[in-house]
């Protein structure tokens, strides 16, 4: 399963109340649609275009870089901006008397494509979607909040609480990242090699990130807190504080979910900050308890309910730090603030379009999912919940989010160790190596998804999703070679049933052949209405009546010439004249419309062209048996 495989696979539109924001005033309001840009980068471009300082640009929230995202920004003063290129479109939507605030955002609308799906993936999505609509999802913070973990920095706030400011500063400036660009990683390696030599580092980082930090340390050795406050942007420090605060909330929320769900009903979802507890098969009392629980983000001055305080105390004991020390942090950018947060989230308008063929991953499917969420909630969390295993002891799943792999935890919440992150195969392909049988497999029919072990077939050679026996769906011709072109189609009526006739090289058909074939006397197509019963329109020419046209086969009844010229048993003039030759090698007499002696073809009427010398004058002089003589002579 893959999210964000292309930029168009993840679309986000910010929803806002224009009646509250739009008004006459000095602030210009813009709709920013960006591809592959962060919110900060888009704001910088807007400030440059308007000719104002970066601080004059405001927005309601941050949007993901990986995708096509649309959000509102305001600019105080400056000149009007109209801009459009592949990465960014700036469109003016009005004026305002104030800058936009977070409370102006009503949430976001999402359209997400999930790729590389098999049948069991789609089954789980449908089952889980019904469960989400009934219960909701615990409102965890997802991977986007924990970029510090993905890029190797860890929780800087935890280092500070443990009295390790040097480790915190070193992680901020020089932690290696598996996702970093090579020039950046090379620069960070240079900082690691010179760490402790502040004068050399000040020279090495001149005019680059960290220069102010090392200049301060060169003048004040050991003052790592002061160096951090002077050399690291406040916005960056605040992001690291929020990451740790969100991690603490996730851990406390997971403990409560596990307590409510009870033994045997806990399920898990992957996350960079640790596995997240979810649930299966809750009763009404458990659902009501989850929806009524309140767990705010921890901050000073907050009165916690006893149950919430108990959960936070458990989390801090596991962290090895004190909750009191966290609340008393007094470092610029690292001062926590309390915030209310709903414990459960219920996506609005959750729906999924029918599955389609995946144009990127052959023989796989893709599904488009749409929903809306309030501000501060994570769409990727909803997608994880949709894909979550529906049974215990499920095979190991893997979800790719852009280029980042997430392996599903087992039933104990542990991610298997030693998973090959470079193995990009679908989980079902990897499951064959261990003989995995899907929960949706048809083992009760005597077969599995990945091969017939009793007959010694290769486990990697997949069977089709329908049985091979002809009598089950009349799908294969009798005996011998079962080619794709030879099997019958039972759901559209386009292929013939039974026998050893090759579809592309068949002789003329007779009315005693199996259902669904061309030329059958009692052939009726009940699912598309495209075929007619044979034998009831023998007196009509091919251009008269209701000539059948089927876009998926193009067949007509036994008296009409077949549209694709594959083995029809009549000519263009209805029953008159000899039958056309089959493609099996018989020659026979060709009908008039295929003869080479063109003088025997019917003479066209004079109204079809200008009269020439020698013409008899008009249609009244045509031969009496000409089909062009009078249209009224024919039916239709």
Image (cartoon, grey):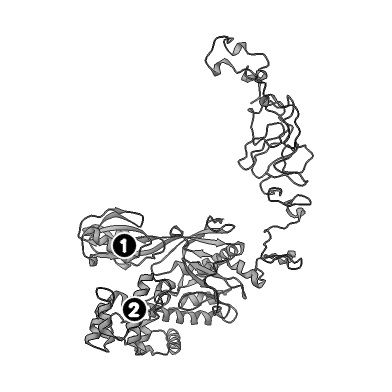
Find numbered disc 2 in the image and state the secondary structure of the residue it sits on: helix
From the image, tell me which residue sits under label 1: 42
Residue 77, visible in the rendered structure = yes
Please give the residue where the numbered disc 2 appears in the rendered image.
190
Find numbered disc 1 in the image and state the secondary structure of the residue it sits on.
Answer: helix
In this view, the mark in front (1 or 2)? 2
Few, some or many C-alpha atoms within 10 Å of disc 2 (few <14, some 14-19, many ≥20)? some
Horizontally, is 509 left or right of 273 in the view?
A: right
Residue 262, percent from left and from top: 57, 81
Disc number at residue 322?
Answer: none
Residue 134 visible? The answer is no
Query: The C terminus is located in which quarter?
Result: top right
- Viewer-closest of 58 and 153: 153
Residue 222 as seen in the image, left or right of residue 339: left
Which residue shows up at 27% across the image and 65% down it? 58
Q: Quadrant of residue 632?
A: top right
Residue 343 placement: quadrant:
bottom left
Which badge, 1 or 2, comes first in the chain's sequence?
1
| Residue closer to the observer: 350 or 120 | 120
- Image quadrant occupied by the N terminus: bottom right
Percent x, y for residue 85? 33, 54
Q: Is residue 481 left or right of residue 189?
A: right
Q: Is residue 334 above or below residue 376?
A: below
Q: Quadrant of residue 340?
A: bottom left
Q: Disc 1 vs disc 2: Cβ atoms closer than 8 Å?
A: no
Residue 153 position (above or below residue 128) = below
Q: Position of residue 21 (x, y in %)?
A: 28, 60
Category of crowding for the residue at label 1, using alpha-carbon neighbours closer than 10 angstroms: few (below 14), some (14–19), many (at least 20) = many
Q: Nearer the viewer, residue 260 or 65?
A: 65
Q: Give me the C-alpha separation between circle 1 and circle 2.
A: 30 Å
Q: Please state which of residues 603 and 599 is positioned toward the viewer in this rendering.
A: 599
């Amino acid at each position: 399963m893959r999210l964000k495989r292309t930029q168009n696979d993840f679309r986000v539109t910010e929803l806002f109340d224009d009646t509250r924001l739009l008004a006459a005033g000095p602030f210009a309001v813009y709709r920013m649609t960006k591809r592959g840009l962060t919110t900060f980068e888009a704001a910088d471009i807007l400030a440059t275009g308007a000719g104002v300082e970066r601080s004059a640009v405001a927005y309601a929230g941050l949007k993901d870089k990986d995708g096509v995202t649309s959000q509102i920004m305001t600019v105080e003063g400056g000149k009007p901006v109209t801009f459009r290129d592949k990465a960014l479109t700036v469109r003016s939507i009005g004026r305002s008397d104030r800058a936009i605030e977070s409370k102006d955002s009503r949430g976001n609308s999402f359209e997400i494509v999930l790729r590389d799906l098999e049948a069991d993936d789609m089954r789980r999505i449908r089952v889980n979607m019904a469960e989400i609509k009934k219960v909701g999802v615990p409102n965890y913070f997802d991977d986007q909040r924990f970029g510090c973990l993905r890029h190797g920095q860890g929780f800087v706030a935890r280092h500070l609480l443990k009295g390790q400011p040097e480790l915190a500063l070193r992680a901020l400036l020089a932690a290696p990242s598996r996702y970093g660009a090579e020039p950046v990683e090379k620069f960070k390696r240079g900082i690691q090699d010179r760490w402790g030599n502040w004068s050399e580092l000040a020279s090495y980082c001149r005019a680059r990130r960290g220069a102010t930090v090392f200049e301060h340390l060169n003048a004040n050795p050991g003052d790592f807190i002061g160096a951090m406050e002077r050399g690291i942007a406040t916005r960056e420090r605040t992001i690291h504080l929020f990451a740790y605060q969100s991690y603490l909330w996730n851990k406390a929320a997971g403990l409560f979910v596990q307590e409510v769900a009870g033994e045997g009903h806990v399920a898990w979802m992957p996350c960079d900050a640790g596995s997240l507890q979810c649930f299966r098969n809750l009763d009404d009392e458990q659902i009501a308890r989850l929806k009524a629980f309140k767990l705010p983000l921890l901050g000073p001055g907050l009165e916690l309910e006893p149950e919430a305080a108990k959960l936070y105390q458990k989390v801090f004991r596991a962290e090895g730090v004190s909750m009191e020390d966290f609340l008393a942090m007094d470092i610029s950018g690292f001062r926590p603030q309390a915030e209310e947060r709903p414990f459960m989230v219920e996506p609005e308008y959750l729906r999924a379009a029918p599955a389609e063929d995946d144009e990127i991953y052959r023989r796989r499917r893709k599904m488009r999912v749409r929903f809306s969420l309030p501000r501060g909630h994570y769409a990727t969390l909803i997608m994880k919940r949709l894909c979550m295993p529906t049974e215990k002891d499920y095979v190991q799943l893997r979800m790719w989010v852009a280029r980042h792999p997430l392996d599903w935890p087992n039933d104990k919440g542990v991610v298997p160790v030693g998973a090959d992150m470079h193995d990009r195969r679908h989980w079902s392909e990897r499951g064959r190596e261990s003989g995995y049988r899907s929960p949706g497999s048809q083992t009760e029919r005597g077969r599995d998804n990945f091969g017939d072990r009793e007959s010694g077939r290769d486990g990697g050679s997949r069977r089709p999703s329908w049985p091979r026996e002809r009598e089950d769906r009349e799908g294969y011709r009798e005996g011998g070679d079962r080619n794709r072109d030879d099997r019958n189609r039972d759901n559209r009526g386009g292929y013939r049933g039974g026998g050893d006739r090759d579809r592309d090289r068949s002789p003329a058909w007779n009315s005693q052949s199996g259902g669904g074939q061309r030329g059958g006397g009692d052939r009726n197509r009940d699912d598309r209405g495209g075929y007619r019963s044979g034998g009831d329109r023998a007196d009509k020419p091919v251009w008269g009546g209701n000539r059948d046209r089927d876009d998926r086969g193009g067949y007509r009844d036994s008296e009409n010439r077949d549209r694709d010229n594959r083995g029809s048993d009549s000519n263009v003039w209805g029953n008159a004249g000899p039958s056309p030759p089959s493609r099996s090698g018989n020659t026979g007499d060709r009908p008039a419309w295929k003869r080479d002696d063109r003088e025997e073809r019917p003479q066209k009427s004079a109204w079809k062209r200008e009269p020439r010398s020698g013409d008899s004058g008009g249609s009244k002089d045509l031969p009496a048996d000409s089909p062009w003589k009078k249209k009224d002579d024919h039916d239709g």
